[in-house]
Structures are given as C-alpha cells and as structure tokens.
Amino acid sequence: MISVLIADDQEMVRVGFRMILEKQPDITVVADVPDGIAAVTAAREHNPDVALLDIRMPGLDGLEVTKKLSPTTKVVVVTTFDLDEYVHTALENGASGFLTKDAGPALLVEAVRAAAAGNALISPQVTVRMLEHFARPAQRPDLSLLTAREQDVVREVARGLSNQEIASALFLSLSTVKTHLASVQTKLNVRNRVGIASWAWRAGLVNS
C-alpha cells in the first residue's frame, strides 16, 4: 500500500483528494491536515510514502515543508499553476513533481504512484509548460557534462516519456536507460526526473 499525507488549507480539496485516493486498492490516506506545521508533525508520526502539499498554507508554506520532508518522503506539490515561481523553488527543494488542483482524478492518482515508485510526474500539459517558462538562454548549463547518449535520454525525460518509452524510442534496454539516468542524476546533482527535465530545458536540449 502507498501511504499518503494530504496538506491543504482548503477542506474541500482535502476531502476531494482523500475520496479519490481511497478508492484505489493500492493507496491509503494516513492523514489530511490544514497547514504546514501540522503536515510536518503528521509526517513524523505516520512516515508516509508520499505527501501532497499545497504551496500556500498557514504556519509553514509548502516550500518549507517540502524542504523538511523531501529527504525521507516523496513530495508532490499541488498548485493553481499560474507560472508561479514558487513551483520552481519547490522542485529545487526536492519535490518529486507537481499537479494542478483541477488536474482530475486520474492525474492525481498517477502523480502519487509515480512519486512512490521514485519517478516524477512529467505531464506535457503541466510540467513542460513550467519548465519551458524557466528555460532562459542566459542560464544555460554546460552540455559537455553529459555524453551524447545521456543527452538523448535526458531529452526524452524532458518530453515526458517513461523509462520504458525512452528505451523503445532510443532502442535501448530498460536497464541501460536506468543506468544512464542514475549517471545523469549524479553528474547534474539533481534529485529526480523533474530536476533532470529542468536542466534539459535550461540547456536547450528539448528544442535541439
């Protein structure tokens, strides 16, 4: 079972998320709380696999809670998504992905399962828009950090492909893709697929 903590100052959001997630046979909600301080307390008590965190909350905001929880708990940030730079900061603080509050039940469940599996939700409708917004040429990283094949893999991650889809697209084995991704995370000093995708956009790989 995937254990989930929900933190949002809107009761209707918490209730809605709980109802959606608890319909799934592999997901259980261990707590839902209205603020950041309660989120940290509940996380210490329940040790959830995944925390769904709103960005704007009383007490501690979602950015600070993400920083505190991300070393031990997979965090998915929930936002209204207005190209808010808070989202970018949350990802830098270790979030495994994010979704919009109106994303729908299927995407919510997908985000939780992806985070629990150690992946990040890279949604073409959501994540790519945000990453493209922050891709400023003046900040482009050094492409020479990665081999040509690693760049190929990173490009597909930024386009939203899963490991299996990357393997098929690049004619690689699944284990080879995983090996490349592990190497990339080490070289780029990023925590997850969102960090990889963000680097790819800033490096201009996605448009190349």
Image (cartoon, rainbow, N blue to C red):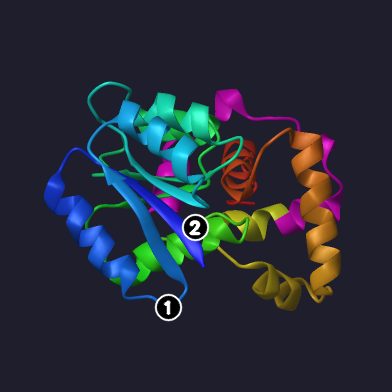
Left or right of residue 161, residue 185 in this image: right
Residue 153: image location, x then y, percent? 74, 58
* 60 and 174: which is toward the camera: 60
In the drawing, what numbered circle is on residue 81? Answer: none
Residue 2, given in percent of the width and then of the height, sits at: 50, 63
Q: CA distance from mark 1 to mark 2?
A: 20 Å
- Mark 2 neighbour density, 10 Å: few (under 14) some (14–19) many (20 or more): many
Q: Which residues are magenta?
A: 125-153
User: From the viewer's perspective, is residue 41 above or below residue 22?
Assistant: above
Q: Disc 2 marks which amino acid?
A: Leu
Q: Is residue 148 visible?
A: yes
Residue tagged by mark 2?
A: 121
Q: Is residue 92 above or below residue 194?
A: above
Please name the residue that numbered disc 1 is placed on.
25
**Quarter occupied by residue 130:** top left
Identify the residue at image location x=70%, y=53%.
154
